[in-house]
Every structure is written in structure tokens, then in C-alpha cells.
Image (tube, rainbow, N blue to C red):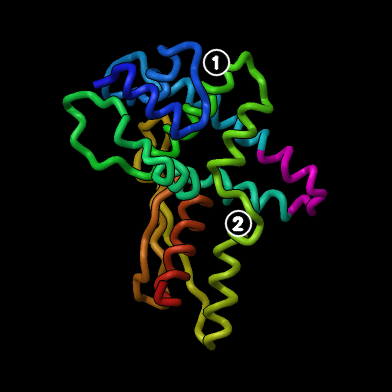
């Protein structure tokens, strides 16, 4: 149930008070609930987040190739989903009665992007306010954002093992935001699998999961 108490709780968690209450509610409305959902906000938020992170990395005067790798990890499904989990926001998601699936990381990432867009529109497109939200709630340090595929390959080589390989397929191309599934193999043995909104994202997520398995984390 969406009421003033719900909105106040969300605003406290995200650190921003909305002037347009309907905009915040829409940011939390899943497509299963009806036509007035967060999909357009998510589309806008994706671009805003890319720009903010690109600007942060540009100011750090990092190498262009390095910036691309780091940005990919920062805006990845898993990283945005972790931000939503840390703020404990998924419980406020408004869903249709017919929706029975578990809230996936992809949906959490969409929610994060829709919140970014909602804040941007509500604060009269003040990029500084949105940047404050991003830097406060979304993990973006360099060490975290290293290329997990490269790190995994270096780790297995250090152990004297052969290379790993990925089998990645488009799981559903009918969705507005397609989902890829990547299976990671060592020789003929399946180590793990992970999903993502792009092929690269799915493979990076699988590599991160494999690293955690190999290191016992």
C-alpha cells in the first residue's frame, strides 16, 4: 500500500525529498501494474547514470580503455541491484496481482535507474543533486570495478589451470530490456552461470561469481 508513510520512508533512505509525489510513485511502479510504470524513467535514468559516471571518471584523468571497463562495472546489473538492496527499497516496489516471479537483479537495477531519473526530473534537472545520490549509494571505486573476466583468467593461470570459456545466449529478445544468460565452463565442467542486460554484462557477472567460488568467498 502506497501512502505518505511509505513515501517518507523511501525519501529518508534515498536522501532526497520529492516535490512531485506522483513521480516518486511512478519510479517504483513495475510494468505488471499497468501502463503508468517506470519503464520510461528507467530509460532516461540509464543515460543519466552513464553520463554522471563518465564525468566522474573523466575528471580522474584515467586511461580511456580503463574508463570503459570501470564504467561497465559501475553501471552493471549486479552493482545497481546491490545499491537497491543496501537501501532496502525493493519492498516498496508496486507490482500487479498477476506478478509471481522473484524480484530479480535486473528489476532492481531498473528500479535504481528509474529513481535516478525521477530525482533528476523532480529537482529541475539539477545534475549536482543527482550526482550526490549516485556517489552516496552506488559503489564506484576502481578496485571494485576491475575487469572480472581478466581477473579470473589471471587467477586460473596462477593456479596452473587451462583457460575458462563462456557460452552466452540471449534468453528473451521480446522484453524491452533483453536478458542474456552466460554459462562459464572449465573444460567440459559447468562452474556457474549468471545473467545480465548485455552479453558483456552477463559474462562479467559469471566471472565474478566464479572468482568467489574458486576463492571460497
Marks 2/1: CA–CA distance: 30 Å
Q: Is residue 3 left or right of residue 179?
A: left
Say whether residue 178 is magenta: no
Residue 132: x %, y % from top left:
62, 34
- Asked whether 50 or 195 is in front, the reply is 50
Residue 45: image quadrant is top right
Q: Residues within 10 Å of mark 1 (few under 14, many from 20)?
A: some
Badge 2 vs badge 1, beta-carbon distance below 8 Å = no
The structure residue drawn at horizontal position 61% and vertical position 41%, both measured from the top left corner, is 135
> Magenta segment, which residues?
53-65
Q: Residues within 10 Å of mark 2 (few under 14, many from 20)?
A: many
Q: Which residue is mark 2?
A: 145
Q: Nearer the viewer, residue 165 or 154?
A: 154
Q: Earlier in the sequence, mark 2 or mark 1?
A: 1
Q: Residue at x 52, y 76 (%)?
A: 163
| 2 vs 1, front mark | 1
Q: Quadrant location of the C terminus?
A: bottom left
**In which image quadrant can residue 109 be found?**
top left
Residue under label 1: 122
Amino acid at each position: 500500500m502506497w501512502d505518505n508513510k511509505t513515501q517518507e520512508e523511501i525519501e529518508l533512505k534515498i536522501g532526497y525529498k520529492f516535490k512531485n509525489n506522483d513521480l516518486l510513485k511512478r519510479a517504483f511502479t513495475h510494468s505488471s501494474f499497468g501502463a503508468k510504470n517506470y519503464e520510461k524513467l528507467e530509460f532516461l535514468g540509464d543515460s543519466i547514470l552513464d553520463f554522471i559516471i563518465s564525468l566522474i571518471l573523466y575528471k580522474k584523468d584515467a586511461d580511456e580503455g580503463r574508463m570503459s571497463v570501470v564504467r561497465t562495472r559501475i553501471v552493471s546489473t549486479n552493482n545497481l541491484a546491490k545499491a537497491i538492496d543496501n537501501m532496502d527499497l525493493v519492498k516498496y516496489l508496486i507490482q500487479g496481482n498477476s506478478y509471481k516471479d522473484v524480484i530479480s537483479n535486473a528489476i532492481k537495477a531498473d528500479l535504481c535507474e528509474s529513481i535516478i531519473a525521477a530525482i533528476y526530473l523532480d529537482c529541475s534537472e539539477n545534475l549536482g543533486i543527482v550526482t550526490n545520490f549516485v556517489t552516496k549509494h552506488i559503489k564506484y571505486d576502481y578496485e571494485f570495478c576491475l575487469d572480472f573476466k581478466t581477473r579470473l583468467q589471471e587467477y586460473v593461470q596462477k593456479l596452473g589451470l587451462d583457460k575458462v570459456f563462456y557460452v552466452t545466449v540471449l534468453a528473451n529478445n521480446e522484453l524491452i530490456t533483453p536478458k542474456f544468460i552466460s554459462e562459464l565452463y572449465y573444460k567440459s565442467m559447468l562452474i556457474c552461470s549468471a545473467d545480465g542486460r548485455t552479453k558483456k554484462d552477463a559474462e562479467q557477472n559469471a566471472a565474478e561469481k566464479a572468482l568467489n567460488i574458486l576463492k571460497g568467498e
